[in-house]
Image (tube, rainbow, N blue to C red):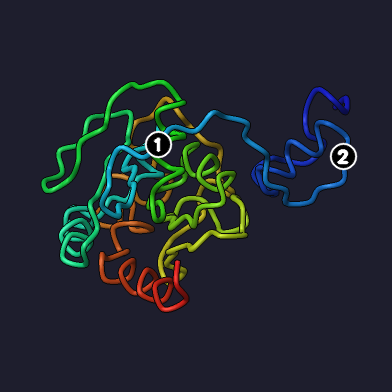
Amino acid sequence: MKQGLKSPVDFRKISLQQVASNILGLYPIELKPKITYNYQDRTIKEKYVCISEFTNHNAKNWNNKFGWQNLVNWLNSEGYKVVSISEKPTKLRKVIDHSGKFPIENRINELKHCEFFITVSTGLAWIAWALNKKVVMISGVTEPSNEFKEDNIRIFNNKVCNGCWHKNNINLSEKDWCPNHKNTKRQFECTTSITSNMVIEKINKLNAKSI
């Protein structure tokens, strides 16, 4: 395997940033990129939180049927407006619906002015991180070592099946890929087992430290 074309180490066994470092022949360190952008004034005057529910693969989504709506209801009760910035349309109630296909500049501006960002393992998480926002990441199919660690408040249940992304051949064309438990009651248990209360507990700890 020629260095510079592919990572000499299986990408499933190392962090995403280390994959890039290996390809470029650089020493792997976690480093926030710098985003140069002409930021606009905030359009939402109240304090708000951005959320992004979806990824390009169901295995990475938060598959708890009631998780997102319960979380939105709680955030509203705590005085936060909730702005959905997923590319896929949201069906959540009591949110400001900015879901859909918008220029990345829109997303940068929305994230720049939010209090924090709640998401799954998405590209937008990396943008928020680069903007020095706290990222509350709900994950299960990817292990904590996969994404960035700084400013990543991760909700991960290690008491159930997890980390399939790193242990199996990934089939992105299979919508409901779940290599160990597909078509059983345990399908996607890595995230169905994550409750809204587990996420709320982490957010409350953040608030105690003053986000």
Task: Identify the element where label 2 is drawn.
Answer: loop
Q: Which mark is residue 41?
A: 1
Out of 55 and 43, give the one closest to the viewer.
43
- Check disc 2 and give the amino acid type: Leu
**Residue 200, x across and y down, in percent:** 30, 69
Q: How far across and down, in percent of the image, does residue 67 sit?
A: 22, 57
Q: Inspect the image, locate mark 1, and give the three-letter code of the amino acid beneath it.
A: Asp
> Residue at point 40% right, 66% down?
160
Which SS class for mark 1?
Answer: loop
Residue at x-position 24% and y-position 49%: 82
As rendered, which of 142 and 68 lies closer to the eye? 68
Query: What's the mark number on residue 26?
Result: 2
Left or right position of 31 against 24:
left
**140 and 209: which one is in front?**
209
Name the side, left or right, on which 91 lies relative to 174: left
Q: Residue 164: give x, y in percent of width and height.
A: 50, 50
